[in-house]
Image (tube, grey):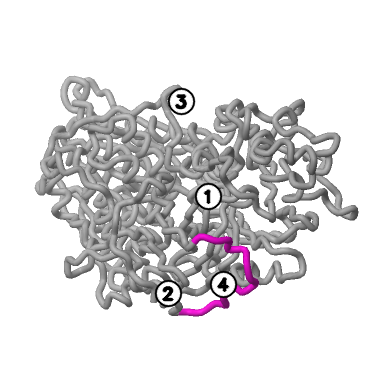
Amino acid sequence: MLSTPPVRPPSPDAGLGPGFVCLPDAAEGSPLQGDSHSAPARAKRPAAPLGLLQWRVELADGAVVSLPGVAESLLLQLDEVAWEMSGVRCRGVLFLTDFRLVLQPCGAPIVGLHDAALPLEIPLGAAAECKAERSAARLYAPSGDYSVDQVLIRCHDFRCVRIIAPRRPGRGVAAPLDALVGALQPRLLRPPLAELPGLPSRLFVASMGQPTAQWGLLDWAAEFLRQGADSKRWRPCRINLQFEVCDSYPPLWWVPVGASDDDVQLAFACRARRRGPLLTWHHRGSGSALLRCAQPLGPASDSQYLERARRAVHEDARLVFFDCRSRLAADANYVYHRGGVEDPRDYVRRPSGAAGLAGELERPLLLCFEIPNLHRVRESFHALRELVEGCPCDSMWLTSLAKTGWLESIRQLLAAALTVARLLHDRDRRLVVVHCSDGWDRTAQVASLAQVLLDPFYRTADGLAVLIEKDWVAFGHQFEDRQFGSFIGHADLQAPIFLQWLFCLAAVVQGAPLKFEYTSEDLGLLADIWLSGWSGSLCHNGERDRRGRRAETAQTSIWAIWLSSRERDGHTDHRSWRDSPVDLVVPAVSLKQLTLWRWCLRFDESVVSQRGSFTEASREQSDIVWWLRDEAAPECFFCRREFALNRRRHHCRLCGLLFCSTCCRRMSGRLAEAGRLCEACLSRHSSDACARANDPVELCSALRDPSPGTSESPRS
């Protein structure tokens, strides 16, 4: 087992967000000596202790311990590797455990291979793809150039890491990386829901001998009592305690008092997947109510049920249907299937007062918002991830970001949630019914965002946990299909719906930080924990699946980790927010004001490259130079001018970085043997100008021209 270090605050070197860890450097010296690499093995200690920053988790008995702690075992260790991320190269040691992949720097920076200390920790759940690329990395040595294999690891958190074993030809180049891919791939290409004892969340609970805390956060009766739902108007309904009516709905429902259990079942039968209109939030001040459901399947048979729900709000309350889909999609469903959208003529009523005496009829209000479906969200997210990983130049950033459509989808969700919140917060009482097709993607996003905009309790850390447990878990969001669809044979169902909602919530928090207990950094920590695969709370298709797999006793709770690991503000008491009056927060809904969440840019080259010290004259020269890939540098490393058709990329033969032709000149005369050199490398080797002039081999000894049988890239 790995030793468990004490939990300590991050050091200045760990300033790249929660995904980075603070690791002590190993002893000075090059890691590129020797050919040994470790075979996969369990319960093996690494050569040097892993001083990892670990999350904290609360156990059922109230104790707070480190995660993963003593539950972690070492599977593989490679002593001679180098890696590159966002244009920064580093050398060191690789550790693969049953929880994560750790890349620990060794030694001081060295020109050509080790730009800066770049410690990385990749939880196994965060890795989306791991593949070996044959002869993909180009290296230079005194004996000539050669290509080596590299392992590409692409992560859900916008990291893209390339790992190589920088050995000379004929010394087993592929063997270490083949061992890495063979040990890592089986742990990535499976959802963490499989009932296997080797899953991180199950390993931790088994090693502790007790479950974690924070599983029973949602108390339906207490929550609706806090919201002010009158027991004379709304009652609990227990017909779904065994999930017999709807397997994707919570076991306990709140329905209008005037509706019997038979009325409820009749109303639910006319909705897709029997997901009928259910109360999810009640306005403490006005009495307006928010219901959520799925699309109708034909002629309305829930009109009487909704009429009773409207009267539970008020006799003069207005019924509003909020369809998250486009009007075109709604009309197409209505024309071809006689369903998919409500017909206002089925829900007319005679208002009270003078209008009713005059014989006027009131129809419900029907609103449609063109919120993208899961297929468009998946395409937009993939485009955004490729954009961030691709290191685009600054002049094209805004244009390229707009082409992804990601910010536009965020804007549409915020605008829809604000509309629902205003309908509920208006002094005219309303019954708002929100739905999309199945009622578990866009409906969950809009309904939960609207509640955050209205309810101060949901702006606290405890309240956010209750909200997600209520509107995402209990109401049946398909976490397993959306996160691991491609691994279980349903690739068309995979989409980052919950992550998109966190982007929206972060935009609201950034716009009004004083209205929230948690910060955008806390939301980033929540995203990291969820993507790590170390918890079992938000990875099941609803509460029924979570109960059936006994996650409460066999897996860790994400709230036991997040609530224990986030930094708390000790100067403000947020407990009073639980019973505070409803207060509307108005977010920015214009693209002129929206900005991309900084969480997804933590590993961008504009942030990571600041850790490099490319012009230090005191660094030694590596005898192996790893040429930086072309797409990793959108601009010259020296003058910072963007590359273009008239400003091509050129590699320096000594450092392997990319420069323009002005900053990386081709040597001539007696120095022609050196090829192209950048200004920094030329000045580093010019301390003894006379000696260099008399003996140019001294300058060129670190790197010679390629062998005659090797072709050279035309761009270099």
Q: Could you say which quadrant of the image residue 570 lies in?
A: top left
Q: Which residue is mark 4?
A: 183
* Circle 3 crowding by C-alpha within 10 Å: few under 14, some 14–19, many from 20: few
Q: Nearer the viewer, residue 709 or 199?
A: 709
Residue at point 78%, 54% (across, down): 145
Mark positioned earlier in the residue sequence (2 or 3): 2
Q: CA distance from mark 1 to mark 4?
A: 20 Å
**Amino acid type of disc 4?**
Ala
Q: Which mark is residue 159?
A: 1
Give the label on residue 591, or none: 3
Is 575 or 483 nearer to us in this picture?
A: 575
Of the residues under marks 2 and 4, which one precedes in the sequence?
Answer: 2
Q: Is 697 drawn above or below residue 634 in the view shown?
A: below
Instruction: Report the magenta residues as a range.
Output: 28-42
Q: Residue at x 16, y 23 (%)?
A: 353
Question: Are circles 2 and 4 on residues that touch, CB within 8 Å?
Answer: no
Q: Is residue 142 left or right of residue 129?
A: right
Residue 597 location in percent, x, y? Answer: 42, 37
